[in-house]
Amino acid sequence: MAWAYALRTTNPPPGVEPDAITRWLVVTRAAVLPMTVFAGLVAGLLAVRADGFSWLDFLLALLGITVAHTANNLMNDLADTQVGTDTAAYPRALYAPHPILSGLVTKKQLVTAVLLCQVVDLAIMLVLWERRGWPVVAFALAGLFLSYAYTAPPLRLKKIGLGEPDVFLTWGPLMVAGTYYSAVGNLPWQVWVASVPYGLLCTTVLMGKHIDKIPYDAPAGTRTLPVLLGEARARVVTKVLLLGFYVTTLAAVAVGALPWPVVAVLAAAPVLIKALGSLSRPRPDEPPAGFPVWPLWFAAICFVHTRRAGALLVLGLAVAAVFELGLPLG
């Protein structure tokens, strides 16, 4: 099915004219939205047995961060096109159809979609502000700022080696802590600690992507962290971040910030070993048969690991929530 293929690969099926839904699944890069859904689920499962938990507020916050991620993807493509970063020869237009350059949508349609996402998020923010208070606004505005500043002038954080910290802060503390606060109305210190492992996990995906793009970014003056570090050191840092997810998860369990069933993440060890091995070997000259997102390579490997480890983290939290096993915040 075309929709499933787009959700799995960020591409429409080869040789098939995409229908409207498939087109927008590709344009919004819906295949990576589960990263945000998992961040929200981490928060919600930590919060579900806490005093003051509201399903309505949690679901609104989960919808809000997912829509915000969608808007972020669209704004990044819009900004990178306007400043000339995205071209037909740049990876963004090679691993999947570029929304504007490929003709999937017009610039006007892209701007309209961004505005629609912002209107939805504004409405959610106002509702949660009324129900939970000003911290909701602080989290929402901080997320919007980091989202906009990632690629858009004048800051363009990606271009000065700050895109990776941006992603860590957004998918870790901001999403997890912000969603937890929205669902409960308070924010124990444990939540900040619990947000660190998942933030590191998502950062590995961006590190892998920017390692893949070094040959394109370095000549263009886009100084991502891997460009600044050089490929060899960037690979080492990515390995450290991959291992750091497990170390910080176990540390969070040890200090009571995560429940003990999240040790289920250790079941992702085979995928971790594969990712570490790939980061230690030369990148292949050609993609394997049927590989859908070339010239990305390390990004895909890190994304597969993030999907597996993130799912196991959520599973462990779900078991803890259902059976009340070691929940630190209940």
Image (cartoon, rainbow, N blue to C red):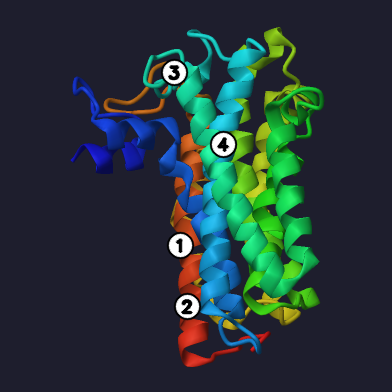
Task: Of the two numbered discs 4 and 3 on the same chain, state the one appearing first in sequence.
Answer: 3
Residue 268 marker: none
Q: Compare marks 1 and 3 and give the one earlier in the sequence.
A: 3
Looking at the image, which residue is at 63% across and 14% down? 82
What is the spatial separation of the Cα atoms under label 4 and label 3, in whole angstroms? 14 Å
Tally of numbered tags? 4
- Judging depth in this view, the residue of 105 and 9 nearest the camera is 105
Of the residues under marks 1 and 2, which one precedes in the sequence? 1
Q: Secondary structure at mark 2?
A: helix
Q: Is residue 89 left or right of residue 126?
A: left
Q: Position of residue 120 (x, y in %)?
A: 54, 50
Residue carrying label 1: 311
Tag 3's secondary structure? loop
Residue named by callout 3: 106
> Looking at numbered disc 4 in the image, what kind of residue is underneath it?
Leu
Residue shown at the point (65%, 86%) measured from the top left = 52
In the rendered structure, are the residues bearing label 1 and label 3 in contact, judged by CB atoms less than 8 Å apart? no
91 up-or-down from 197: above or below: above
Answer yes or no: is residue 302 visible.
yes
Q: Amino acid at mark 2?
A: Ala
Residue bearing mark 2: 318
Judged by depth in the image, the label closer to the viewer, 4 or 1, is 4
Image position, residue 257 (x, y; %): 71, 77
Q: Of callouts 3 and 2, which one flags the residue occurring earlier in the amino acid sequence?
A: 3
Residue neighbourhood size for the residue with mark 4, other residues' Cα within 10 Å, grouped as few (<14), some (14–19), many (≥20)? some
SS of the residue under disc 4 = helix
Distance (Cα) linking label 1 and label 3 = 35 Å
* Mark found first going from the N terminus, 4 or 2: 4
| Rendering coords of residue 266 (x, y %) | 52, 66
Q: Residues within 10 Å of mark 2 (few under 14, many from 20)?
A: many
Reading the image, the residue beneath label 4 is: 115
